[in-house]
Image (cartoon, rainbow, N blue to C red):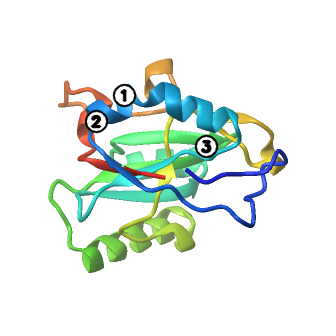
Amino acid sequence: MLPAKETGEIREDAVMLLRTWDAETIHRSIPWLRARNAGGAAIYIRPHGEHHLSLVDDLSAQAVQQMKGSGFEPTLVVETSPGNFQAWLNHGRILDKKTSTAAARVLAERFGGDPGAADWRHFGRLAGFANKNFAIGNRMAFSPMSGSRSSMPKSSTAKPSLFFPPCRLV
């Protein structure tokens, strides 16, 4: 979590509150996270440690479609603000930090994502929580459970949360 001012700007005294939680703890903590988010905190998530996912941030809807058309099927797509998306791609195996960062950079470059967010440990917005960014107003990063723009591999029957190993929340 990252505390913010009423305007949505990050407070100068903001400190990231890192937590390492499994899926059950995340689900159990949703009311607490919602309360923190209502108070202005930004809620972010990432897998803990080395993992099998890459986050591509700051994508347009067209870029997400290009990604899919190129054979990349995101595990999860989160609309973080109107027309702006984050896509999580599953590599099918755990990548070491260097390889994971290189993959994220190549994906960001290829699909027009934010190169500054392209590394193995970057946080993404947790779906279902308000994006308090003042420039865009109080929008929601929609949850796949509420019919947002999200996708899961067609062969999977698992719940979306099961695609993420123990996660680090901030």
The answer to whether residue 167 of the structure is visible from this angle is: yes
Q: Which residue is mark 2?
A: 23
Query: What label does residue 80 carry, if any?
Result: 3
**Few, some or many C-alpha atoms within 10 Å of disc 3 (few <14, some 14-19, many ≥20)?**
many
Pointer 1 with pointer 2, Cβ within 8 A = yes
Q: Earlier in the sequence, mark 2 or mark 3?
A: 2
25 shown above or below 48: above
Q: Residue at x 28, y 35 (%)?
A: 23
Depth check: 41 or 65 in front? 41
Query: What label does residue 19 carry, if any?
Result: none
In this picture, residue 85 sits left or right of residue 100: right
The CA distance from mark 2 to mark 3 is 21 Å
Please identify the quarter of the rendering in which residue 137 is found: top right
Q: Which residue is mark 1?
A: 27
Depth check: 164 or 54 in front? 164
**Few, some or many C-alpha atoms within 10 Å of disc 2 (few <14, some 14-19, many ≥20)?**
some
125 shown above or below 153: below
Q: Give amino acid for label 1.
A: His
109 shown above or below 144: below
3 shown above or below 159: below
In this picture, residue 169 sits left or right of residue 75: right
Q: Give amino acid for label 2.
A: Ala
The CA distance from mark 1 to mark 3 is 20 Å
Depth check: 74 or 30 in front? 30
Where residue 9 appears, x then y in whole percent? Answer: 78, 56
